[in-house]
Image: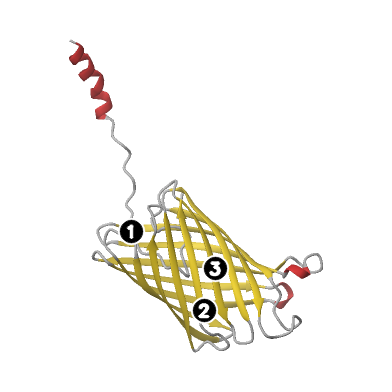
């Protein structure tokens, strides 16, 4: 009798099914121009990134720091807030160097509108609002926000078999600097990655095509990502400019912590 009662009591529990999660295709995410959140993000996912970079701009050296927080409040929607700091140094006198500053604040949203497990592909649209800020020594003397950049974007990604991944990111950047009017630049970032089985590691390349003041430049960014633990990973990127006036080699490192 006791066995039958326990069995009967267990039937409703066994009959309950866990809610089915929406499809999500695992894509390799670029390390330099990373996404707001994983494509096909699921509710509750959260991540913190910190990064540091070095760029040889010819006349001076630039050191960059960033911190970002990204999360998914609902399925397929990712939100992100990011702060970037720029520090400058070089042989020139202090008057000729760019001033150190909190470079910008970025606020982004990204929605994966098509996720196909059958085709192992995902497409998403999003929007980034960038607030370019004045330098530290001008606080209280000039407007804090010196430029506002609006950047809608489109992302398409495809996984080929087990190891190969491709991704395309396209975005116009419309800058408004008050009385100076507006200017539009473009960014097209193509990525190819090879992931190692059951490890979370990958090697890959980003090819960034950018328009600046009416001219186009190309930068190659070979990169590697190492999975340190279940929730922690590190990425290293080298920047090799092609036809980009005034820029030399650069490097960038990113630490990724999933919460």
Q: Is residue 78 above or below residue 20?
A: below
So how many labels did they put on this image?
3
Q: Is residue 182 left or right of residue 172?
A: right
Which mark is first along the chain, 1 or 2? 1
Residue at coordinates 34% horizontally, 48% vertically from top-left? 22
Where residue 129 sits in the image (x, y, percent)?
A: 59, 63
Q: Secondary structure at mark 2?
A: strand
Residue position marked by numbered label 1 in the rendering: 26
| 3 or 2: tag closer to the N-terminus | 3
Is residue 112 depicted above or below 219 in this figure?
above
Badge 3 element? strand
Q: Earlier in the sequence, mark 1 or mark 3?
A: 1
Q: Which residue is mark 2?
A: 250
Coordinates of residue 221 in the picture (x, y in percent): 44, 77
Q: Which residue is mark 3?
A: 52
Label 1's element? loop
Q: Residues within 10 Å of mark 3 (few under 14, many from 20)?
A: some
| Mark in front: 1 vs 3 | 3
Picture quarter containing residue 195? bottom left
């Amino acid at each position: 009798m006791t066995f039958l009662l326990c069995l009967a009591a267990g039937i409703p529990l066994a009959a309950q099914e866990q809610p089915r999660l929406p499809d999500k295709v695992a894509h390799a995410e670029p390390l330099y121009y990373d996404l707001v959140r994983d494509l096909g993000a699921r509710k509750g996912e959260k991540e913190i990134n910190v990064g540091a970079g070095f760029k040889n701009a010819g006349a001076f050296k630039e050191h960059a720091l960033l911190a970002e927080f990204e999360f998914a409040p609902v399925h397929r929607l990712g939100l992100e807030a990011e702060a970037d700091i720029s520090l400058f140094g070089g042989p020139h006198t202090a008057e000729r160097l760019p001033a150190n500053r909190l470079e910008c604040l970025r606020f982004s949203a990204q929605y994966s509108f098509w996720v196909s497990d059958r085709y192992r592909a995902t497409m998403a649209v999003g929007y980034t609002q960038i607030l370019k800020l004045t330098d530290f020594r001008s606080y209280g003397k000039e407007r804090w926000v010196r430029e506002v950049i609006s950047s809608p974007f489109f992302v398409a990604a495809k996984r080929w078999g087990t190891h190969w991944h491709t991704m395309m990111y396209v975005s116009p950047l419309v800058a408004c600097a008050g009385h100076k009017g507006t200017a539009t630049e473009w960014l097209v970032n193509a990525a190819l990655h090879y992931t190692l089985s059951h490890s979370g590691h990958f090697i890959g390349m980003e090819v960034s095509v950018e328009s600046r003041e009416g001219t186009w430049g190309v930068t190659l960014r070979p990169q590697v990502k190492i999975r340190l633990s279940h929730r922690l990973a590190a990425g290293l990127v080298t920047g090799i400019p092609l036809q980009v006036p005034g820029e030399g080699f650069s490097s960038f490192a990113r630490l990724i912590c999933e919460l």
